[in-house]
Image: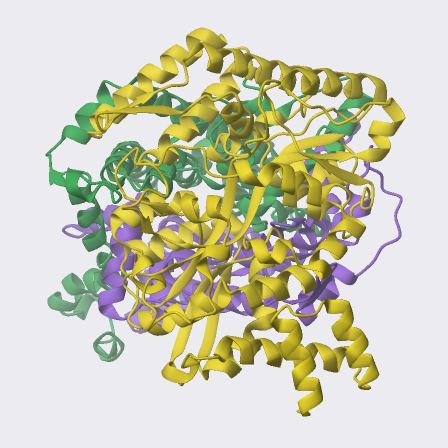
Chain colours: A green, B yellow, C purple
Amino acid sequence: MTAAATEMRTPVKQSRFMRRALPYILSLPALLMCIGILIPFFTAVYYSMLRYRMNLPAMKGFIWFQNYVNFFTDPKFWNTVYISLTYAFLTVVLELLLGLGIALLLQRPSRFNNIASILLLLPLMTAPALAALMWKLMTHPDFGVLSYLLTLVGIHDFKWASNPDTALFTVVLVDMWVYTPFIMILLLAGLRSLPKAPFEAAALDGVPRSFVFFRITLPMLMPYIITATLFRLLDSIQQFDIIYAMTQGGPGDKLLVFQVQAYLDFFQATNVGRSAALMVILWAITYALSNVFIKQWLKLRERAHGAH
Amino acid sequence: MFEKEKGLFDAFVAKKISRREVINGAGKLGLSASAAGMFLTQAQTRAMAADFDWMKYKGTKLKLLLNKHPYADAMIANIQAFKDMTGMDVSWDIFPEDVYFDKVTAALSSGSTEYDAFMTGAYMTWTYGPAGWITDLNEFIKDPAKTNPNYNWDDVLPGLRASTSWNGVPGGELGSADAKQWCIPWGFELNNISYNKKMFDKVGVQPPKNIGEMIEVSAKLTKDLGGPYGIGVRGSRSWATIHPGFLSGYANFGEKDFNVADGKLKAAMNSAGSKSYHKDWVKMIQDSGPKNWSTYTWYQVGTDLGAGASAMIFDADILGYFMNGGDNKEAGNLGYAPFAANPAAAAPTPNVWIWSLAMNNAGTQKDATWYFLQWATSTEHDLFGARKMDFVNPVRASVWKDDEFRARIDKSYPGYLNQYEVSAPGAKIYFTAQPLFFDLTTLWAENLQKMVAKEINVDEGLDAMAAEMDKKLSEAGLG
Amino acid sequence: MDHSSSLEKLLRSVAITLVLVFFLFPIVWIFLMSLQTNETILRIPPSIAFTPIIDNYTALITGQLRTAAGSLQLNFMQNMFNSVLLSVCSVALSLVLGVPAAYAFARFKFRLGEDIAFTLLSFRFAPALLVLLPLSLYFKTLGLTNTYIGLIWVYQLICLPLILWIVRGYFEDISPDIEHAYRIAGNSWWRTFTRISIPLAKPGIAAAGLLAFIFAWNNFVFALILASADKQPVTVGALAFVTASGIQYGQIAAAIIISITPTLALALYAQRYLVEGLSMGAVKG
């Protein structure tokens, strides 16, 4: 940085070398800090090609892609893919809609709105593993305050996470409670940093509000929406804490998402090969999804900057 | 210490006189109760120290990995006695039960030398043993140079000694002649009935004697109490749902999880007897089990009993024990009864959970670690924990004969000693020891959930489950 | 948006009330539980009539838990200290590394730029479980097992991608013209970056830093696997009340309330920067 600080006084005269090197100087430390993680990552990819169960050491051997091939013919695996994607889709879409709605409600800066937006972060601040324990108690048929409130409106014996028909609903509800604030706060910060000029012009011209929202607010907010959705999607498809604490993947195999299955394979069955293969598949799915998102994000950015 | 007092306490430790005589004698000698307790500890130390060089590893530092549990609390309360006797230092890491075994697996699988010994359940040693993570303790127990002459290994209940030893062969009988002692039993739970006496009196029923009665009594309790449900059992998607009440009753009908022939395993859950037992069990939960059954783990089963939401549980006896104290609403109202599911069975056959101590195979000071293990599993420490702390159920036969312990239990836990004595002879692990234990038992729980939710029919469900298990066994080279 | 009808105002108020109730009712309920023993928490039906006690808090803070079985030692405050240390250091390091990198990706188009940015993001989607076992082996080799440094390094996987990608968006929204103007006035690049670019992106940096802090705070898998009991965060500390002799709901609730306090304080402090967003809007492209 000393070189940058003592360099010549105008950008025009900045040395060619500095101009070319600067972005690397700025970004490489971050990359180097994380690159070490690639070694364990590749080790894990190697494990995924082993028949490797720690309590059957004699069976250990290199089997190429056999672990993967086994998955593709296993209906339980496809159930896991299905339920993980369903869960991720439901939580992300619902949280996005709700988070956007709340951000719009709190958009105008006022003391009340500012404090409310911070208080709404409280669920996010509660560790999901503990939050799930509390939800489990609140949905208890006898001691649970939520079950009790339901009886007041005439719904008796609602079985929440223990019924195969309502288990998904229940964990999605808890996920929404915990993570909607994440999307809300990012979109709120985004909304508040949008330039005022286009909105003032539209107000002067008497443009209908729905038009303003869909043609001005939403497009301008889109990069923020994509970032928030991307991060939420990455976490949601890898959800573990809430589902494991609420149902351990049950009832039956209703909520047996990737992480729960891989956790059981690894920590209980010590089936390292199978668990690693499952995780690599999950990694590939998230990789593909994020690629799509990032491409879209860059395209939007390009367009936004073209409009300057 | 004065000779007269010394003689008195030594006589007690040698079981020549009873506790009451000691206290009376101590009173006559003008000792306060606390001083008497202190002298007793010293006497224990002296008794153990006879003919054995406890100071051999003086200065050695040991580190333990412990689960947050009353057994660990009892050990910590008494650890000074060990430190004084051996001159060793002991430290420990305690992790919550929720994450404890994850920590153990992580530490052992990475070959960590940090921990010398750790708490484990017997089932876990079916993984840790074959993986090479724990040491066969027979090489210590059977070596008189390493084990003090008063250790009295045979005092540990035979069913527990057998259940913690396995030859490592999939399907191999527990406690066989060639078995390795993977861990030392420390404290254990057997599965019987704990029930709310007030509720039973109100409805006018007695603790059930077999599965048919259990279904009836639970249904009657559910109906007549108008709020609390009849029978609390676990139901979460975990192997832990199968191992307490469910398997105890299952074994009482002589049903097995696997058949072993020519070294090959074959799932046995689809026999006619098994199907009929599954049907009873499923009906019982549907009629009078917890409403949120499929999320129920041990603490919810216990909490409901303690808070008066359920009238009875068929689960670990010590779960009922703990619910009869503390700030539980129903503390003082609970009773205990043995339970044999099969009307034709002579006695109960409770499956057991055994908290044990095992030695890290990667540990670097095994001989010193064994000193700790033999102290922590000694009669003296077992007695201390059973009398003064919640170190129940003790694993040594001699402790169950101790008057003070018996008096303490009998006073506050009516029926507890009886349920233990009636079922102790049949108490052991009824699972087949094999490497796929956790996968397949969790699969069993998953199918039980589907049956209770009426997603699958019991007969077809069990056939399909057995076929799936056989496939997994053969993939692993076991079936 | 200033000419809203009174009907709309009413609908807005109703909507905000519903939102606050949904998100805050469980928190309020947890707070109420933290002032009770199991005996009053576990009532049928649940009730809000109880005599509040602060025993759960005193037990957590003094480290003495009195139970039927006697007095037990707790180290919840040590867990708190660990959480604060790990989260603060991890976020600080992530900001130092992530903000300049975010700026580079936003301002410059350079060879491999997008690849590096995407690689950094991809660390976020490597499932923790996938890398944990190899990581614990390598940590042993490197001597990083059971060190704060090692944990802070691993926490970068949680914090860095989040900060980088959120802050990048904010930098992209700042018009380069302002920076150009300042540089032409004779200021160095570094001065421009610290005096103009960073202050303009403050709302984004505050939001990203806050969220990264929360995610670091709530993580416990890394510490559980890679460190001993004395370096465990609050989540592990709170799980200690799920014991073999019963679950202590009151203490878990109190632990939750204590554990969200520092984060809440940080959020209230960061809020002033989040608000600045609007005033900054005027200078953006």
Quadrant of the image occupied by residue B434? top left
Where residue C59 sits in the image (x, y, percent)?
71, 65
Quadrant where the N terminus of chain C lies? top right
In this picture, residue C92 sits left or right of residue C245: left
Quadrant of the image occupied by residue B285? top right
Q: Is residue B444 visible?
A: yes
Where residue B95 sits in the image (x, y, percent)?
50, 58
Q: Nearer the viewer, residue C217 or C213?
A: C217
What is the tally of numbered marks visible in this picture?
0
In this picture, residue B367 sits left or right of residue B445: left
Q: Is residue C203 visible?
A: no
For the point 66% across and 52% down, the residue is C252
For the point 28% across and 39% down, the residue is A271
Q: Nearer the viewer, residue C61 or B475?
A: B475
Where residue B107 sits in the image (x, y, percent)?
34, 58
Instruction: Spot the residue most to the front.
Output: B16
Where residue A139 sits in the image (x, y, percent)?
68, 31
Quadrant of the image occupied by residue A272? top left
In this picture, residue B269 sits left or right of residue C78: left
Q: Nearer the viewer, residue B74 or C66?
A: B74
For the point 23% across and 35% down, the residue is A277
Q: Nearer the viewer, residue A138 or A115?
A: A138
